[in-house]
Amino acid sequence: MASPAQQRHVVIACFLGWTLDAFDFFIMIFALGAIAHSFGTGITSVTWAITLTLAMRAVGALIFGQLADRFGRRSILIANVICFSLLEFASGFAPTLAAFIVMRALFGIAMGGEWGVGASLTMESIPASWRGTVSGILQSGYSFGYLLAAILYGVAFPLVGWRGMFMLGALPGLLVLYIRASVPESPDWLLRRGRSTSSSILAAAARRPWLFVYAILVMTAFNLFSHSTQDLYPSAFLRGQHHFSVREVATVAVIYNIGAIIGCLSAGALSQRLGRRRTMILCATAAILVIPLWAFASSPVWLGLGAFIMQFMVQGAFGVVPAHLNEMSPPEVRGTFPGFTYQLGNLFAAANATIQAMIAARMGHDYSAALAMTCGFGAVAIIVLIGLGREARHARMGAEAATAGAE
């Protein structure tokens, strides 16, 4: 069993991995307009890069997850960080829009592997009493990454342009040095290594098909809920529709990502007492009530407030997901199940940005209704699906499973 100090290193490393992965993704969100201008096209065309990035994350979750179930979480996490850092750097050199979209699709494969491998390594390495709080910490890395991208956009974009921002996005590769020096292998995986239990995701799905279908539906709803509030909000809604300056867009983005981080941490901790399902339903319900302020206000102050509350609720609900998916997972495929179902949900929700852009184009480039409709649909779907599910927060895994196996 890992020592408390080693457990903290695992949490820090996996939090940073998801932070820097998200940072690399959201650089593109802020640069959409500049990328479109550079390649002489419209924002709708560039959103296909977002769609393919999200869609290909399912491929990455399957590849890296199966490798993690077979060869261990730690070494595969290191390989994954190296891959997404190199592909981010290469994106800055894309000579055409087609080459850029291909590069972002490859980046999506690398991005898709990180969350599942990091989440399983974390949850298998910590005590059960930490899970809710650490789930919020881990998922808040997504919002920290968004926050870092917003700061980089406000500070560096006027100086280095969108290509320079992608090149700076390669810096997360340095995280590999910390993982190699400080992070131990999952005790749960070490216990299962060499056992005859099949680690094939197909075999596990055949044994429990409805669990896989349910988890994929839940994560489709979550990804629609999250991406509908984020992907086009800064560039198309704030910058394009409301004509905010670069500084104003960056400021609002910083504000709503602070809300997202607080929401993740608060809801994750709350779920340890209230339960995973109740906490997620509470956050999704509250998000619906915030839609009028978030999507239909006009001044920077009110939009900033609405965005802060919205992201508190959206990412609060998402902050419970790492613990909930890992607790639901069959133990023999925990390196694959959480990430694969998460990213398949991303695949089925991947057209969100393009759909929002098409709806807005039909409404005179007014994004308010498009944002409101997709966000509201995602929230309602979460309420219904989570309400039909089961609570699994008392599942034994990680350190507890390793201890029990040794008895």
Image: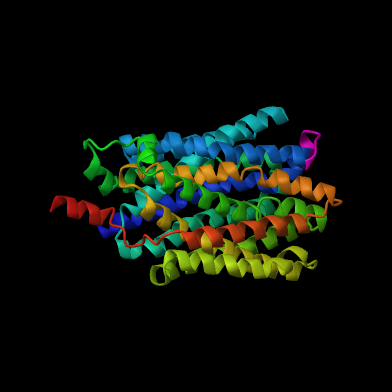
Pick out the residue farthest to the right.
364
Q: Is residue 341 visible?
A: yes
Image coordinates of residue 307 in percent, x first then y, are: 67, 65
Asked which quadrant contains residue 284, the reply is bottom right
Tell me the residue at 43%/64% (across/down): 276
Residue 390 or 67: which is nearer the viewer? Answer: 390
Residue 324 or 269: which is nearer the viewer? Answer: 324
Tell me the residue at 51%/39% (across/down): 58
**Is residue 121 magenta-colored?**
no
**Is residue 42 magenta-colored?**
yes
Tell me the residue at 75%/54% (across/down): 370
Q: How many marks?
A: 0
Q: Which residues are magenta?
A: 37-43
Image coordinates of residue 103 in percent, x first then y, are: 61, 31
Asked which quadrant contains residue 393, the reply is bottom left
Residue 330 or 303: which is nearer the viewer? Answer: 330
Q: Is residue 119 left or right of residue 84?
A: left
Relative vertical location of residue 58 with respect to residue 186 in this rendering, above or below: above
User: How are the residues colored?
Assistant: rainbow
Q: Is residue 23 left or right of residue 61?
A: right
Asked which quadrant contains residue 346, the reply is top right
Image coordinates of residue 402 in percent, x first then y, are: 21, 51
Relative vertical location of residue 269 with respect to residue 195 in this rendering, above or below: below
